[in-house]
Amino acid sequence: MNSFPESLLIANRGEIARRIIKTANRLGVRTVAVYHKVDAGLPYVSEASVAIELKGDVPVQSYLDRGQIIAIAREAGATAIHPGYGFLAENAGFAREVADAGLTWVGPSADVIVVMGDKVESRRAVAAAGVPISGDAGAALKTGEEAVEEAGRVGYPVMVKASAGGGGIGMAVAHDADELRKAFENTKSMSERSFGSDRVFVERFVESARHVEIQVLGLNDGTIVALGERDCSTQRRHQKLIEESPAPHLAPETRARLIESAIAAASSVGYRNAGTVEFLLDTRTGEFVFLEMNTRIQVEHPITELTHGVDLIEQQLSIAATGTTTADFNPVFRGHAIELRICAEDPKKFFPRTGPIDGWIEPSGEGIRVDSGYAAGTEVTAHFDSLIAKVCAYGESREDALARAIKACQDFEIEGLVTNQPFLEEILSDEEFADGRYDTGLVERIQQRLKERAKLARRSA
C-alpha cells in the first residue's frame, strides 16, 4: 500500500485548502481543488495540480454540495477526499458517501462522527470510559422542569447547551430556576432552527474556566497518540482569537490527567485519524470536565506542529492510506507557540468587513509562520467566515514566542481591508495575558479596560 493517497481532492477553500495542498504537493500527492467563481483568484486555486469550478449560484451551498464534489473527485481521478475544517468536515453523511463511492475519507468513520457530533451521545460515551463530565450522562432533557431537576443535582449556576452544532450558538447561563426555564426554551428553539435538533442538556457553569484541548491521532491498531495541549481560553463570545501551546501555568499532574482522559475519550469510540478532545478546566479547583470532541483537523493545529516538529496533515494522509503514522514520525514536545487569528472585521465592534485587498505583506523571520488564504489583488466577500490568515510565533520560551507574536502582528501589512489586528495587539500587550494566568473571561475584561481608558481620555481632553 502507498504511504499516501495518490490523488487528493480538498473539499474546502481558502486558508485550510492552501495548507493541505502545501503538504500534499511536498509529498508528491496530486491535488484537486474545487472553487466557486467568487474564489477564482484565491491562491489555493492556482497552487493545486488541478482546479475545478463548482456549479451553483450560492457560494456556500456549492461547497456543501456533496454529490457534486464526489462527482468531481471521480471525474478528476482523485482517490481520496480531505474535508479540512468547517463545511463538510464533520458531516457523517458526506463521510459515508465518500466511502461508498470507493474513495478514501481523510478522517474518522461516519459512525464516530455521529457519536461525537452529538454532545449528549459523546458525553455518554466518554463518561462510560471514566472521563469526567459535568451533570448527567443520560438522555437529552425534554422539558424545563427536567432541566430544573438536573440543575438541582449539578448546582447553580448552570449552562444550557444544544446537543448539536457548535460555535456557542444557543448557549445560555442560568442562576436560578426561573432563569433556567426561559433559557431552556430559548436554547431548544434556537437549536431546532440552527441545527434541526431540539436536544438540550444542562451542565455546571464554571465562572473562572480555561478552555484546554488535546490533539490526538488515532491509528488502526487502536493506538491513540496524544500531542500535548493547546490553551484556547482567549475567546470572544465563544469564538477563539488566540491559542497557545503549551497551556501556561498548567500543573504537570493536571496535564497528565488531561492527556489520559483525552486518550480514553478517543478510545471509547475507536477513533481514527486526527481529532481534538476539548475540556473545561476550573482555575480555582484544578478539576476539569469533557466539553466535546472535534472530529477533524483544528484551525489552531499549527501551534502543535511547531511545538512537536510534526506535520499533522502528512500524518492524516498517512493514517488514511496505511492506518498508521509515517515511519519517521517522532514528535518531541519543546518550546512555546502562539497563534493569532487575523480576521476581516472591525477591531472595536467586531462586525465582519469585506472588500478588495490592495496590499498584503506577511511577517517573516525566525519562529514566524503564516497560514493565509488571501494575497494582494484578491477580495474578501461576505459569503464566508471572516478568518483570512493565521500568524504563528514559536520560541524556546513563552516570553520569546510572545515577543515574536507582537512584532509579527505589527509587521503584517494588509492594505485596503479592515482587520482585527489592533485588538489582537491589545490582547498580546495586556498584563493579564502576558502573565499567562487568564481564563475565558479575559477578552471581556480587556474590552472593559479599553472602555474605561477611553472614558478617561475623553474627560481629560
Image: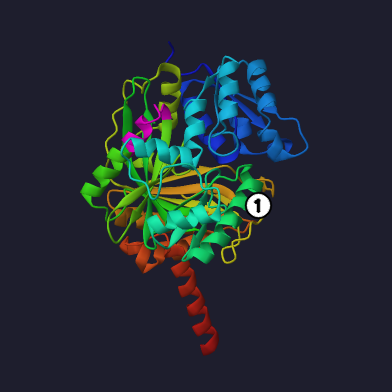
Looking at the rendering, which quadrant does residue 429 occupy? bottom left
Q: Residue 51 in the image: x percent, y percent?
A: 65, 27
Q: Where is residue 300 in the image (x, y as percent from the top left)?
A: 44, 44
**268 drawn magenta:** yes
Identified at 55% across, 85% down, the residue is: 458
> Who is closer to the viewer here, 444 or 267?
267
Relative height, residue 268 to residue 458 (above, below):
above
Where disc 1 sits, the SS reads loop
Report the residue at 65% width, 51% height from top.
357
Q: Name the residue under label 1.
A: 358
Q: What residue type is labelled 1?
A: Asp
Identify the magenta region.
Answer: 262-273
**39 displayed left or right of 148:** right
Left or right of 460? Residue 40 is right
Viewer-proximal residue, 189 or 406?
189
Q: Is residue 305 above or below residue 367?
A: above
Question: Which quadrant of the figure contains the C terminus?
Answer: bottom right
Q: Residue furthest top?
A: 1
Quick check: 318 left or right of 50?
left
Residue 230 seen in the figure? yes
Quick one: label 1, few (<14), some, or many (20+) residues within 10 Å? some
